[in-house]
Image (cartoon, rainbow, N blue to C red):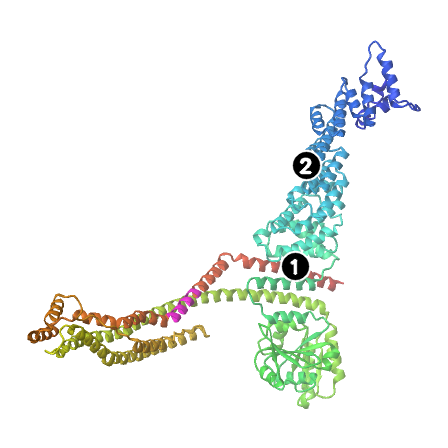
């Protein structure tokens, strides 16, 4: 048979789909079943002397397989020994798979070796199916990735892998497959798939450098799709961490800087991303050192790829950066920027972008804990009202200027010449407020307004005024030309009107006014109040004004009905101003003023921190000294008050040591011959206790109570003097603090508690009887025994009486004195133990307050030192953002200047 040569080219394709029998043995037009055809072929081949039945058996196995007779198919394929043997084994494994014998199928697939790329790929796909069906996902992933790597041009393999990864949401492998397939096949379909993954945020987990190769390939093949993919990746990385986003910017710029010039391409989307990114990079979050490795390539690439709408801003950005950081770009880049900035037809809303910059700087300043002057915010808000023209009115004299402003506003509004800058605005109701650094302070009445304008203030006055409404203007009434001027006055003004008195004006002052106002046009009003000046003077002044200021309009104020002429004058001086362009310049000027203000605030902050640290150090020393003084005073009072109490107690002890023995010895007078000596010791013991208690209650206790009250009075005086001392200390510190920082309150209940304790001791003493003659001393034992034995014998009573008396009078009562004293003074000694604690409690709160204030001051000093050290050790954290804001400012100034030049040429 000739089948082996005929199907040589497509044989592997036929084998893959198990259609070998069809293309080899089935003849066109034959309708017999394949089983019969192959059976007949088998019989014929078997009759040959040198028969080869392997090909027929192989084909029979296919037929059995298609008819799901898998066991018969396996039987046929087991006996293949020719070049189809590897395919037969593959088919056997397929049959095992269909029978659910996955392990047998896996083992058989692994046993097959072949040089055929097609068969090897098929084996990988079959193994992938085995693992996938069994849920062995790790092995499935490994196998399909090996298949793709082995045969990347096999479309089915890559498609199967992609579908598998997407179904299992294995986006890492899906992205990796798309990148590798796109790079190797250069198929636009794979680049589209990769872009879809990027759009869906599936590429963000890869480092930006991962896409460099595939982007390089795409740049060469399809720059339209290159822009779309780059833009998609760019937007996806924008939402990631700052360091990842910066890595992307570095990577894409490094990629583009080495590409051929793409200026012939229109990359609007990418051009906008470059614009947005550049604006974001200059928001103050990154330092100049970090940006120095990013910006040069970024701007050079942007200039290279910018479309017509962004060439102007791209060129201005390059020139502004080079101006602030010289020698950043080579001369070719600079020349290109200079050429493009003149040729560019694109436009940018500089007013809007300037406002964004202003807001960015405000936000950054807030993060630096800087309170920006509110009047600056107010001024920018006024400048954004493009529908109203601002006339700054000043004059050679206050009276002439004031009269003209009053005449415009329809009455004596000012009353007297003003030292303030006042903006008059048309409004339905009267509303007046002072504009300060911190906000707007309402001025509630005209009388308050007249008081306020005598001071140097910035005031907003809203009131009904027909001329302001009709001509859509505000009047900014400013002090005379000889006064020192604020930059804000000129930034607010669209036009300056100088009111001149024919007899009082100074050309040098007017010239200086114009020099200070820079680009603000100046016009003049000649005051002719009540015809005080003759026509000749007015004419000469008018001619001189036209000579010196040929473009200035001159209005002669005659204080008569000149409403029409006045309206014409106002319309003539306002119509020549292109407000949006003028306000853009003024907002740029406001940004410069804002940055200058912030720099000044920075110096103020450093000085304030230094002052605060010095103040804290001084206060810590003063507070420490106060604490030592108070502790010394506490010790002194403890010593004085406890000492005086101990003196009273010792006096009582002394009195008892003297009085008790006398009282006891005096009891000898109770003994006589008629005494019942058998009970005499009991009677004497009772009487002695009675006399001692009587003495204690009638004499000792009153003395002690009187003494303790005197002691409390003295202690109260001591505490009073201490309070005076603390009040002086408190007043001194609070004067230093400038507020009621310290209270230094003492415990005022101690004296009351002592008085209550004294009353309790006076009324609560209960002296128990003591054993005086009932103790077991030898003398007492003998006397009591003798009394019992001899007390009934008359002849012995005289002797016993004499001996008892002698005993009573000569007995040592020190032990009794000590016992009585101890029992009597026990409560007083308990009171004494609390005196030191009570005195300390009197001083406890002020001492605690002082110590707490010291700790707070130490913390404040440490915080201020840390802030100051941070400011000094890392000045770039403050200076770099301002430098970058300045770059943005110069960028917008470049655009404004170029637009102005182009307008003049046209």
How many numbered marks are there? 2
- Which is nearer the eye, 570 or 504? 570
Instruction: In the rendered structure, find residue 137 and report the number of the disc placed on it.
Output: 2
Badge 2: how crowded within 10 Å, few (<14), some, or many (20+)?
Answer: some
Residue 806 coordinates in the image, percent (x, y): 9, 74
Residue 887 coordinates in the image, percent (x, y): 62, 58
Looking at the image, residue 163 sits to the left or right of residue 398; the answer is right
Above-or-below relation of 194 to 774: above
Indicate whether residue 849 is drawn in magenta.
yes
Locate the N terminus and report the quarter of the image it occupies.
top right
Residue placed at 67% from the left, 70% from the top? 383
Above-or-below relation of 665 to 131: below
Looking at the image, residue 232 sits to the left or right of residue 837; the answer is right
Indicate whether residue 877 is drawn in magenta.
no
The secondary structure type at the circle numbered 1 is helix
In the rendered image, the residue lying farthest to the right is 29
Q: Which quadrant of the view contains residue 682?
A: bottom left
- Which is nearer the eye, 424 or 164? 164
3D distance between C-alphas at marks 1 and 2: 56 Å
Residue 116 coordinates in the image, percent (x, y): 74, 25
Residue 760 coordinates in the image, percent (x, y): 33, 76
Magenta residues (range) = 844-856
Residue placed at 72% from the left, 55% from the top? 310
- Which is nearer the eye, 144 or 254? 144
Looking at the image, residue 812 sits to the left or right of residue 844; the answer is left
Nearer the observer: mark 1 or 2; the answer is 2
Q: Earlier in the sequence, mark 1 or mark 2?
A: 2
Looking at the magenta stretch, what is its main secondary structure?
A: helix
Locate the C terminus and report the quarter of the image it occupies.
bottom right
The secondary structure type at the circle numbered 2 is helix
- The residue singled out by tag 1 in the image is 891
- Residue 67 visible (yes or no): yes
């Amino acid at each position: 048979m000739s089948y082996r040569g005929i199907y040589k080219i497509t044989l592997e394709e036929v084998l893959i789909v198990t259609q070998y029998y069809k293309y080899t043995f089935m003849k066109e037009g034959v309708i017999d079943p394949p089983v019969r055809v192959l059976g007949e072929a088998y019989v014929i081949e078997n009759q040959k002397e040198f028969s080869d039945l392997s090909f027929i058996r192989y084909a029979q196995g296919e037929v059995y397989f298609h008819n799901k007779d898998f066991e018969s198919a396996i039987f046929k394929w087991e006996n293949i020994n020719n070049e189809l043997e590897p395919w037969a084994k593959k088919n056997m494994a397929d049959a095992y798979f269909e029978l659910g014998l996955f392990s047998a199928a896996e083992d058989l697939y692994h046993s097959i070796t072949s040089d055929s790329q097609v068969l090897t790929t098929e084996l990988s796909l079959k193994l992938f199916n085995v693992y996938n069906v069994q849920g062995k996902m790790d092995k499935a992933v490994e196998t399909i990735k090996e298949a793709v790597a082995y045969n990347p041009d096999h479309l089915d393999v890559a498609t199967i892998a992609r579908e598998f990864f997407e179904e299992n949401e294995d986006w890492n492998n899906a992205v990796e497959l798309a990148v590798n397939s796109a790079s190797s096949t250069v198929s636009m379909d794979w680049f589209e798939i990769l872009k879809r993954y990027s759009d869906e945020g599936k590429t963000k987990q890869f480092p930006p450098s991962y896409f460099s190769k595939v982007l390089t390939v795409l740049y060469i093949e399809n720059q339209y799709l290159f822009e779309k993919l780059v833009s998609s990746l760019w937007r996806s990385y924008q939402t990631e961490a700052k360091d990842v986003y910066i890595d992307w910017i570095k990577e894409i710029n490094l990629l583009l800087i080495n590409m051929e010039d793409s200026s012939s391409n229109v990359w609007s989307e990418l051009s906008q991303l470059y614009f947005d990114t550049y604006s974001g990079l200059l928001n103050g979050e990154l330092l100049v050192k970090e940006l120095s490795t990013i910006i040069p390539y970024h701007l050079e690439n942007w200039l290279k790829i910018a479309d017509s709408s962004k060439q102007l801003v791209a060129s201005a950005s390059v020139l502004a950066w080079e101006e602030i950081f010289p020698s950043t770009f080579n001369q070719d880049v600079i020349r290109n920027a200079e050429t493009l900035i003149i040729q560019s037809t694109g436009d940018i809303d500089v007013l809007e972008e300037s406002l964004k910059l202003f807001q960015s700087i405000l936000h950054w300043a807030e993060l630096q804990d800087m309170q920006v002057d509110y009047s600056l915010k107010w001024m920018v808000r006024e400048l954004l009202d493009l529908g109203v023209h601002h006339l700054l009115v000043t004059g050679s004299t206050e009276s002439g200027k004031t009269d003209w402003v009053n005449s415009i506003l329809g009455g004596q509004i000012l009353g007297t010449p003003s030292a303030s800058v006042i903006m008059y605005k048309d409004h339905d109701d009267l509303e007046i407020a002072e504009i300060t650094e911190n906000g707007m302070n309402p001025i509630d009445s005209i009388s308050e307004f007249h008081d306020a304008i005598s001071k140097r203030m910035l005031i907003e006055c809203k009131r009904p005024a027909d001329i302001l409404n009709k001509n859509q203007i505000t009047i900014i009434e400013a002090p005379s030309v000889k006064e020192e001027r604020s930059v804000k006055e000129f930034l607010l003004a669209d036009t300056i009107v100088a009111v001149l008195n024919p007899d009082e004006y100074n050309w040098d002052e007017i010239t200086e006014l114009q020099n200070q106002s820079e680009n603000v046009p100046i016009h003049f009003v000649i005051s002719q109040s009540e015809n005080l000046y003759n026509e000749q003077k007015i004419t000469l002044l008018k001619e001189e004004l036209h000579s010196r200021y040929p473009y200035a309009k001159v209005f002669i104020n005659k204080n008569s009905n000149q409403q029409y002429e006045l309206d014409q004058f106002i319309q003539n001086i306002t119509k020549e101003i292109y407000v949006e362009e003028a306000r853009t310049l003024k907002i740029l000027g406001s940004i410069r003023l804002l940055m200058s203000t912030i720099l000044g605030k920075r110096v103020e902050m450093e000085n304030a921190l230094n002052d605060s640290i010095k103040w804290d150090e001084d206060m810590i020393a003063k507070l420490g000294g106060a604490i030592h003084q108070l502790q010394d005073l506490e010790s002194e009072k403890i010593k004085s008050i406890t000492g005086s109490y101990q003196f009273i107690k010792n006096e009582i002890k002394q009195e008892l040591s003297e009085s008790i023995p006398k009282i006891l010895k005096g009891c000898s007078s109770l003994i006589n011959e008629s005494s019942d000596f058998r009970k005499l010791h009991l009677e004497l013991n009772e009487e002695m206790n009675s006399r001692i208690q009587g003495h204690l209650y009638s004499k000792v206790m009153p003395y002690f109570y009187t003494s303790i009250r005197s002691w409390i009075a003295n202690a109260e005086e001591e505490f009073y003097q201490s309070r005076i001392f603390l009040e002086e200390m408190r007043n001194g510190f609070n004067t230093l603090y400038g507020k009621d920082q310290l209270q230094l309150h003492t415990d005022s209940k101690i004296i009351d508690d002592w008085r209550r304790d004294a009353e309790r001791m006076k009324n609560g003493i209960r002296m128990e009887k003591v054993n005086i003659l009932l103790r077991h001393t030898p003398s007492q034992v003998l006397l009591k025994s003798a009394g019992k034995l001899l007390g009934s014998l008359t002849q012995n009573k005289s002797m016993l009486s004499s001996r008892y008396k002698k005993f009573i009078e000569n007995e040592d009562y020190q032990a009794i004195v000590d016992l009585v004293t101890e029992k009597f003074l026990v409560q007083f000694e308990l009171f004494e133990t609390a005196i030191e604690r009570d005195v300390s409690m009197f001083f406890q709160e002020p001492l605690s307050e002082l110590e707490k204030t010291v700790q707070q001051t130490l913390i404040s000093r440490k915080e201020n030192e840390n802030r100051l050290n941070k400011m000094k050790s890392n000045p770039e954290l403050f200076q770099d953002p301002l430098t970058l804001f300045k770059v943005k400012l110069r960028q917008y100034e470049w655009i404004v200047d170029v637009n102005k030049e182009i307008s003049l040429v046209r």
